[in-house]
Amino acid sequence: MENEGGDSTKARTDADEDDDDQPMLSSQALDALKEYLSEQNQSPSGSTGSGITLVAEDWRLSQFWYDTETAEIIAKEVLDLCLSTQSPVAFIACPTLYAYLKYIDGNISAQLLEYDKRFEQYGSDFTFYDYNHPEEIPAALKHAFKVVVADPPYLASEMPSGNDLIHQNPQLLSKECLEKVAQTVDFLAHPTDFRLLLLTGDVQRDRAAELLGLYPCGFRPQHSSKLGNEFRLFTNFDPGKNLGGWDREK
């Protein structure tokens, strides 16, 4: 569930739920969806142009894949971190980056924590993950990673799909999810030595600093569906020239 931008309500936790429980998108996400669908009519679904084939985005799960340049740049940074720390990497809800990393170097040990079970195709590298239950993760993964990458979905739990707060204050949804994903990061990451990369909206800048001690990088991630909201990459380490360094200016 690479929820890379976009605003939606609670994703279905049961494939057999009634249509009334289908997620509702904000007006911003609907605009992005229209543009995405228009592009889909012009190019093959799932094709990245780099030799990597991804499953089609599922907008009902607020899935919007990175463009090729973004995915390659971040995947190469993750590769360098894995090699320098001699550690596997945990990807939380960002299957594009998992796919690109494995394409660049198939020997790197990586774990994808993901809600979308289509990614079970990755076998033992896949762990089902629902951010509503941030620590329902196999005990073997606890504190097992010195490199963690997260792209929290913009979803709401415990909110009915028709709640006006969802449409008036979408930042509340991403805030709630970020808080829960922070618990997952704490579970997965080495307790004293780890590198964290967080991809989320710029509106989460202050919250990312408060919860996880992160700063935005100069590098600006882009999506293949050209989302309108400003998206940022945050880290708990100064990435230097690779990602444009830290951008501490508001």
Image (cartoon, rainbow, N blue to C red):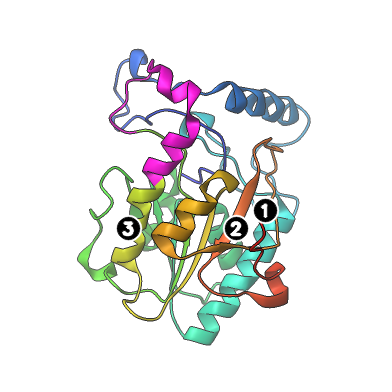
Asked if the stretch drawn in magenta spans residue 182, the answer is no
Which mark, residue 221? 1
Q: Which residue is mark 3?
A: 184
Other residues around mark 1 within 10 Å, as few (<14) / some (14–19) / many (≥20): many
Instruction: Determine whether the residue tagged by mark 3 lies in a helix, strand or loop.
Output: helix
Is residue 159 rendered to the left or right of residue 41? left
Q: Amino acid at mark 1?
A: Pro
Asked if residue 117 shows in the view, the reply is: no
* Outermost residue toward the front in this view: 250
Which stretch appears magenta?
A: 157-177
Residue shown at the point (56%, 44%) measured from the top left: 203
Q: Is residue 192 above or below residue 95?
A: below
Q: Earlier in the sequence, mark 3 or mark 2?
A: 3
Q: Are marks 3 and 2 in contact (CB under 8 Å)?
A: no
Residue nearer the viewer, 147 or 230: 230
Q: Which mark is residue 238?
A: none
Q: Amino acid at mark 2?
A: Leu
Amino acid beneath label 3: Thr
Q: CA distance from mark 3 to mark 1?
A: 23 Å
Residue 61 versus residue 123 in the image, above or below:
above
The residue tagged 2 is: 233
Mark pair 2, 1: CA separation: 7 Å
- Please tell me how many numbered marks the rendered image carries: 3
Q: Please tell me whether residue 160 belongs to the stretch shown in magenta.
A: yes
Residue 84, image x, y percentages: 54, 86
